[in-house]
Image: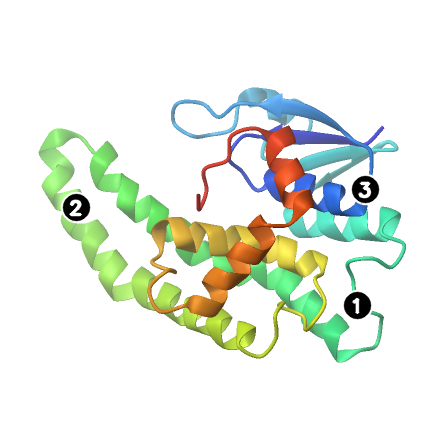
Amino acid sequence: MLIVHHLNNSRSQRVLWLLEELGVPYDILRYQRQPDMRAPAELRAIHPLGKSPVVTDNGNTIAESGAIVEYLVGAYGNGRLIPPPNTPERLRYTYWLHYAEGSAMPPLLLKLLFTLMPKRAPALLRPLVRKVSNQALLGLVNPQLKQHMAFWEGELSKSEWFTGDAFTAADIQMSFPLEAAAARGGLEQGHPKAMAFLDRIHARPAYQRALEKGGPYTVGR
């Protein structure tokens, strides 16, 4: 049986959604974040890095969101949620599948980090940490994030989905960056196409079923 090692409020929500779209039976093993938001140590028994998402299937342990998407679509998709090979859409699919974590998420993670640092710093150091964090946000992180959000808006102005007119697993992969940007990056300001994308994915029945099975999910909501 395919098992999703599911950490609450994490990227593994996308894996549940993908499986619901494909109609693949699966079991969920649940893990709860610690008070510091880190994954519990129990996940290291599944994969040495101790992070989610991870799936186990037929003796295989697969980590990393993009690799999991490729594995599941290849093993269970039967041509669904992926454009035909040797087409422009397939090239775009591959790009967005890897761009989501390789390029889109780093500035969003930096945004979260520099926002949290002053709150978690010792009281005596808090003013200094806040000053350094604000400089990093204003001078580096926010401009990069603004550039990425403008990129998404431009691409979604060309087509309804990231790879073209058809919904694919690349849209599932891209959901997390856009949800994170809506939660803490100001996506709602001047990016109507990107916000409409979020409305479309949130309305999908498979997305709703994944929410019911995955439990509370607050990223971007």
Residue at image coords 25%, 65%:
139
Residue occupied by mark 1: 83
Query: Picture coordinates of residue 19 (x, y %)?
Result: 75, 42
The answer to whether one can see residue 101 in this image is no
Query: Picture coordinates of residue 172 (x, y %)?
Result: 64, 53
**Mark 1: amino acid:** Pro
Instruction: Choose the circle earlier in sequence order: 2 or 1.
Output: 1
Quarter of the image holding residue 80? bottom right
Instruction: Choose the circle earlier in sequence order: 3 or 1.
Output: 3
CA separation in Å, label 3 and label 2: 47 Å
Task: Determine which of the numbered discs, if any, sits on residue 130 in the image.
Answer: 2
Quarter of the image holding residue 190? bottom left
Answer few, some or many: residues within 10 Å of disc 3's Cα (few below 14, many 20 plus, some between 14 and 19): few
Answer few, some or many: residues within 10 Å of disc 1's Cα (few below 14, many 20 plus, some between 14 and 19): many
Task: Determine which of the numbered discs, if any, sits on residue 65 in the image.
Answer: none
Left or right: 199 as drawn, with respect to 86: left
Nearest the viewer among 194 and 83 is 194
Query: Picture coordinates of residue 128 (x, y %)?
Result: 12, 45
Instruction: Choose the circle earlier in sequence order: 3 or 2.
Output: 3
Q: Secondary structure at mark 2?
A: helix
Nearest the viewer among 124 and 210 is 210
Residue occupied by mark 3: 23
Task: Verify CB contact (< 8 Å) between mark 2 and mark 1.
Answer: no
Q: Secondary structure at mark 3?
A: loop
CA separation in Å, label 2 and label 1: 46 Å
**Mark 3: amino acid:** Gly
